[in-house]
Image: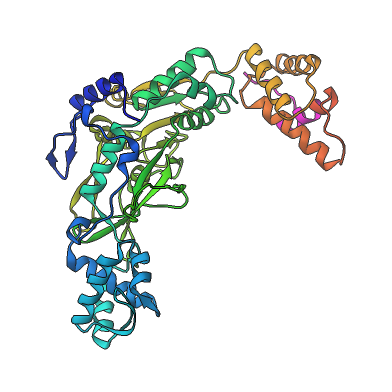
């Protein structure tokens, strides 16, 4: 679907504000009128080695490692392993044969032969594995990855109020909060959510990601100066059937927009390339794996590293929509930074954030503790979601306990108390029916002895 005139106008304004930069050089982005519909972003398969964007020698070495790893390697099997068209793989394997690195054991068809390693090939593959032990799908170039990320961002569909309402259907949120989430989703600017524990910061962030919807293409791996960076991660990425109308480049995977969540484990080092000394290739950091989707920094301010250091690390990506990563050789590379970035913190941003960082944030949202009315709406909705009978006297009893103990309310507590009731009934092998007595026991088990809390 082609972008609307309004979408194109906002895309133009954004590109004027944040010019595209690729491999250290300024490049002119395509005009909104030339924006490609999502279906047209199907990555075309390369018809030659040059089309792959990779060096012939690099691909030949990767093909040799593929033969080494497969005791019954055929042209077809190697093509599947390398995610390249059989014609290109046949060219590579024939080169290895002419160089006397491999031998042809059997000819199955004119372009499908069975290969095996020769002594010379064993010697070379040992040297190759010492330099880089990656065996798998051929990577794409950093240039190709950068262009694909930028193009997909340019044609990203807008998020309408209906999508926001559907995404937050299970949450009880003020209309003003829903409106803010819609603006954030469309702008792709960052969001800082603050509030006491249990007031739904993480749930709001996940709902906001759900509203984005859609699918994107990501590469299995990226090549930079002969180095390989693994991008696809089965823990972060959910592949979907592309159902293409034409052949496509198998080095790319179509996935649901990713949601990557990091918390207390966040460090400065984890935001850079991770180099494995054993296999000699890199794992992309979480901000690269979240490109095109959402990156949630949960429990921000509680990491082992000082918040100021983290703020300084985020300033350039927030300002320029690009990030800089460092190879183990010391060379820095530029990668796109195109995701919805959400910070969620129990702390007040004014308590630990610097102005230089705060002014680069897009929006701020306070997840406030619920009023008695809002608490009641949450309680009733969850009771009915559990297919239980709701009775107003149950809520009255709960609100009386809050008043008696002077305890502050949290948005998660109605759910937690009902779930404790279910645990009790399950343990005692009794029907799950909410009663005042059952809620009293759940309250005691959840909050402990009577104490005064504000």
> For the view shown, which residue lies furthest in the bottom direction?
119
Front one among 398 and 216: 216
Name the residue: 17% across, 42% down: 22
| Side of 336 relative to 214 (left or right) | left
What span is in magenta? 440-454
Quarter of the picture containing the C terminus is top right
Name above or below for residue 249 compared with residue 213: below
Residue 362: image location, x then y, percent? 34, 23
**Left or right: 240, with 309 as reference point:** right
* Front-lying residue, 430 or 44: 44
Residue 168 placed where, x, y %?
54, 24
Instruction: Using the image, determine if residue 423 lies above or below residue 144.
Output: above
Instruction: Evaluate whether residue 447 shows in this view.
Output: no
In the rendered image, which quarter contains the N terminus? Answer: top left
Residue 56, picture quadrant? bottom left
Location of residue 437 (image quadrant): top right
Depth order, front residue of 454/131: 131
Tell me which residue sits at (58%, 28%) in the image.
198
Q: In the picture shown, does residue 242 fall above or below 172?
A: below
Relative side of 20 to 270, left or right? left
Judge whether residue 282 is colored magenta.
no
Q: Furthest residue to the left?
A: 25
Question: Residue sitting at 26 percent across and 74 percent down?
Answer: 93
Judge whether 95 appears above or below 440 on screen: below
State the residue in front, 75 or 118. 75
Q: Is residue 47 visible?
A: yes
Tell me where residue 66 appears, x and y as whole percent: 33, 72
Judge from the rendering whether residue 134 lies leftward or rightward of residue 53; answer left or right.
right
Residue in view at x 35 percent, y 42 percent: 287
**Residue 339 in the image: x percent, y percent?**
35, 35
For residue 450: magenta? Answer: yes
């Amino acid at each position: 679907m082609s972008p609307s005139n309004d979408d194109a106008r906002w895309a133009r304004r954004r590109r004027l504000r944040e010019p595209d930069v690729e491999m250290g050089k300024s490049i002119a982005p395509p005009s909104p009128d030339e924006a490609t519909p999502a279906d047209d972003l199907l990555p075309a398969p390369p018809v030659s080695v040059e089309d792959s964007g990779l060096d012939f020698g690099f691909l030949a070495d990767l093909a040799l490692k593929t033969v080494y790893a497969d005791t019954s390697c055929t042209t077809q099997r190697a093509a599947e392993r390398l995610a390249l068209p059989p014609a290109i793989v046949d060219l590579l394997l024939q080169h290895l044969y002419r160089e006397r690195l491999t031998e042809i054991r059997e000819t199955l068809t004119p372009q499908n032969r069975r290969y095996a390693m020769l002594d010379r090939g064993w010697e070379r593959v040992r040297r190759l594995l010492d330099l880089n032990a990656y065996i798998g799908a051929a990577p794409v170039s950093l240039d190709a990855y950068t262009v694909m990320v930028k193009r997909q961002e340019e044609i990203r569909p807008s998020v309408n109020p209906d999508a926001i309402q559907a995404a937050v259907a299970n949450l009880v949120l003020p209309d003003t909060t829903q409106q803010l989430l819609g603006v954030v989703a469309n702008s792709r600017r960052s969001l800082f959510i603050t509030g006491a524990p249990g007031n739904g910061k993480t749930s709001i962030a996940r709902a906001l990601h759900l509203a984005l919807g859609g699918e994107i293409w990501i590469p299995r791996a990226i090549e930079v100066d002969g180095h390989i960076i693994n991008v696809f991660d089965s823990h972060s990425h959910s592949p979907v059937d592309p159902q293409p109308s034409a052949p496509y480049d198998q080095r790319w995977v179509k996935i649901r927009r990713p949601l990557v969540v990091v918390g207390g484990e966040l460090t400065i080092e984890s935001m850079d390339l991770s180099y494995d000394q054993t296999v000699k290739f890199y794992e992309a950091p979480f901000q690269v794996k979240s490109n095109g989707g959402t990156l949630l920094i949960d429990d921000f301010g509680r990491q082992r590293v000082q918040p100021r250091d983290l703020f300084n690390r985020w300033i350039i990506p927030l300002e320029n929509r690009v990030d800089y990563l460092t190879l183990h050789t010391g060379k820095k590379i530029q990668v796109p930074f195109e995701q919805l970035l959400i910070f969620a913190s129990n702390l007040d941003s004014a308590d630990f954030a610097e102005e230089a960082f705060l002014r680069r944030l897009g929006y701020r949202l306070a997840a406030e503790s619920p009023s008695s009315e809002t608490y009641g709406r949450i309680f009733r909705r969850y009771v009915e979601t559990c297919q239980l009978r709701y009775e107003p006297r149950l809520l009255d009893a709960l609100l009386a306990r809050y008043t008696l103990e002077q305890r502050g309310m949290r948005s998660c507590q109605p759910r937690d108390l009902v779930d404790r009731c279910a645990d009790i009934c399950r343990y005692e092998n009794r029907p799950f029916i909410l009663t005042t007595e059952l809620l009293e026991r759940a309250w005691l088990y959840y909050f402990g002895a009577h104490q005064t809390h504000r």
